[in-house]
Image (cartoon, rainbow, N blue to C red):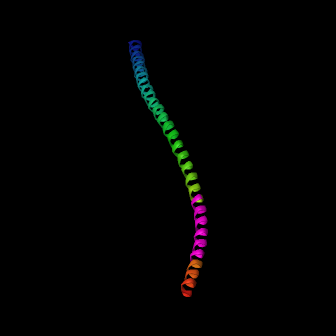
C-alpha cells in the first residue's frame, strides 16, 4: 500500500509540475506578446522621433539662415546710415553757406 501511495503522490507531483509548466509557458507567451506590442509601439515612437528630429533640423537650419540674413541686413543698414549721415552733413553745410550768401545779397539791396 505504501508503494501505491508513493506512486499516487509522485503522479500528483508530476501532474502539478506539468500544470505549472503549462501555466508558465502560457504566461511566458502572454509576456512575449506584450513585449512584441511594446516593441512595435517603440518602433513607431522612434519613427516619429526621427521625423520630428528631421523637421527640427530643418527649422534649425532655417533659423540659422534667417540669422545670417538679419545680420547682413543690419550691416547694410549701418552702411547706408553712415553714407546718408555724411551726405546730410554736407547738405547742411551747403544750406548754411547758401543762407549766408542770401543774407549777404539781401543786405546789399
Of residues 36 and 4, the one drawn nearer to the viewer in this rendering: 36
Q: Is residue 103 above or below residue 27?
A: below
Residue 80 in picture, x, y percent from top left? 58, 62
- Residue 84: image quadrant is bottom right
Residue sitting nearer the eye, 88 or 104: 104
Write the residue at 57% across / 78% down: 96
Q: Which x, y percent locates residue 28?
A: 44, 25
Residue 21, image quadrant:
top left
Q: Residue at x 38, y 14 (%)?
A: 8
Give the residue furthest to the front: 109
Q: Residue 79 appears at what percent x and percent y? A: 61, 62
Quarter of the rendering containing residue 93: bottom right
State whether residue 68 is above or below residue 105: above
Magenta-colored stretch includes residue 77: yes
For the residue pair 95 and 23, the one nearer the viewer reads as: 95
Quadrant of the rendering where the C terminus is positioned? bottom right
Image location of residue 49, percent across then percent down: 49, 38
Image vertical order of residue 70 relative to residue 24, above or below: below
Magenta residues? 76-95
Quadrant where the image shows the N terminus: top left
Relative height, residue 4 to residue 35 (above, below)? above
Left or right of residue 34, residue 92 in this image = right
Name the magenta segment's main secondary structure: helix
Q: Is residue 94 on the magenta stretch? A: yes
Q: Residue at x 54, y 42 (%)?
A: 57
Q: Residue at x 55, y 54 (%)?
A: 70
Amino acid at each position: 500500500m505504501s508503494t501505491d501511495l508513493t506512486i499516487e503522490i509522485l503522479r500528483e507531483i508530476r501532474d502539478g509540475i506539468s500544470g505549472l509548466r503549462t501555466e508558465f509557458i502560457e504566461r511566458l507567451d502572454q509576456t512575449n506578446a506584450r513585449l512584441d506590442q511594446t516593441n512595435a509601439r517603440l518602433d513607431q515612437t522612434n519613427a516619429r522621433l526621427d521625423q520630428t528630429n528631421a523637421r527640427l533640423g530643418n527649422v534649425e537650419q532655417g533659423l540659422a539662415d534667417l540669422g545670417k540674413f538679419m545680420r547682413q541686413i543690419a550691416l547694410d543698414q549701418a552702411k547706408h546710415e553712415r553714407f546718408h549721415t555724411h551726405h546730410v552733413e554736407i547738405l547742411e553745410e551747403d544750406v548754411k553757406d547758401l543762407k549766408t550768401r542770401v543774407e549777404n545779397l539781401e543786405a546789399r539791396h
